[in-house]
Image (cartoon, rainbow, N blue to C red):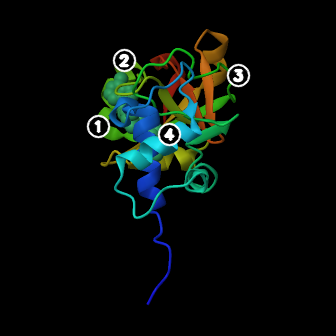
Amino acid sequence: MSSETPSINYVSLSKAMSKALRHRPERIGITLAPDGSVELSVLLAALNQRGGWPRTLTEADIMEVVEHGSKQRFAVEDGRIRARYGHSISLDEAYVPDAPPAVLYHGTSQRFLDSIMSEGLLPMGRQIVHLSTDVETAWAVGRRHGGKTVILTVDAERAAKEGVTFYRGNESTWLADCVPVTYLSVTE
Ligand code: HQG
């Protein structure tokens, strides 16, 4: 007879947290502050209310995803939790402007390339454009879209100097409202 506590699938939990904090907070009955945050206890109660977990979620389960998830997707401060990037919902104060590194990268699928090289990088289904600090990360981001992966180099230093606003997402992710073509080059 086993008395083991059922374990939580942290990938599923991370996806549920992303959905709640980036896309559909109303689905689980929570409201985000203008910076995208909500009290951690409120998110926890809402996720438990939603159900579908093998046992009741605890704050430690959420902190496991925050601290040991595959990426730094979430930040917790003063008992509140928010997504660091990735929002499709519009929030007034989700991102704080910051000076970017000189060069950033964007991984994408070749099928988007013509459009990107005529319109620039646009947020598309999200609120903001996502950029990577290194080619390896950009590669992983681009590969998600299928087809041949291409890497664009972004002259972030010149873009920032000329008025493009950048924001820090996490250690390997930077954000921008949009990136005009003049700052993009295809990396061979
Ligand atoms: C493309 C994941 C046509 C853009 C990742 C991208 C990232 C254009 C796609 C984060 C375009 C949008 C975000 C234009 C941009 N014409 N296509 N003018 N401008 N695009 O998923 O950057 O795992 O919204 O190249 O790792 O791929 O969720 O953005 O291919 O950090 O935490 O439109 O999501 O993080 O796709 O990924 P996405 P993304 P998580």
Amino acid beneath label 3: Ala
Position of residue 23 measured from the top left corner of the image (x, y, whole percent):
38, 32
Position of residue 60 measured from the top left corner of the image (x, y, whole percent):
61, 55
**Which is closer to the viewer, label 4 or label 3?**
4
* Cα–Cα gap, marks 4 and 3: 32 Å
Res 111 label:
1
Label 3 belongs to which residue? 99
Q: Residue at x 53, y 26 (%)?
A: 36
Position of residue 37 measured from the top left corner of the image (x, y, whole percent):
56, 29
Q: Residue at x 50, y 18 (%)?
A: 177
| Pointer 4 local density, CA inside 10 Å: few below 14, some 14–19, many at least 20 | many
Q: Is mark 3 within 8 Å of ligand 1?
A: no
Label 4 belongs to which residue? 43
Q: Residue at x 56, y 53 (%)?
A: 65
* Cα–Cα gap, marks 2 and 1: 14 Å
Q: Earlier in the sequence, mark 4 or mark 3?
A: 4
Position of residue 27 measured from the top left corner of the image (x, y, whole percent):
33, 34
| Pointer 1 local density, CA inside 10 Å: few below 14, some 14–19, many at least 20 | some
Q: Is mark 2 within 8 Å of ligand 1?
A: yes
Q: Is mark 1 within 8 Å of ligand 1?
A: no
Front one among 51 and 62? 51
Q: Earlier in the sequence, mark 3 or mark 1?
A: 3
**Which is closer to the viewer, label 4 or label 2?**
4
Q: Please tell me in which quarter of the rendered image ligand 1 is found.
A: top left
Q: Can residue 181 be seen here?
A: yes
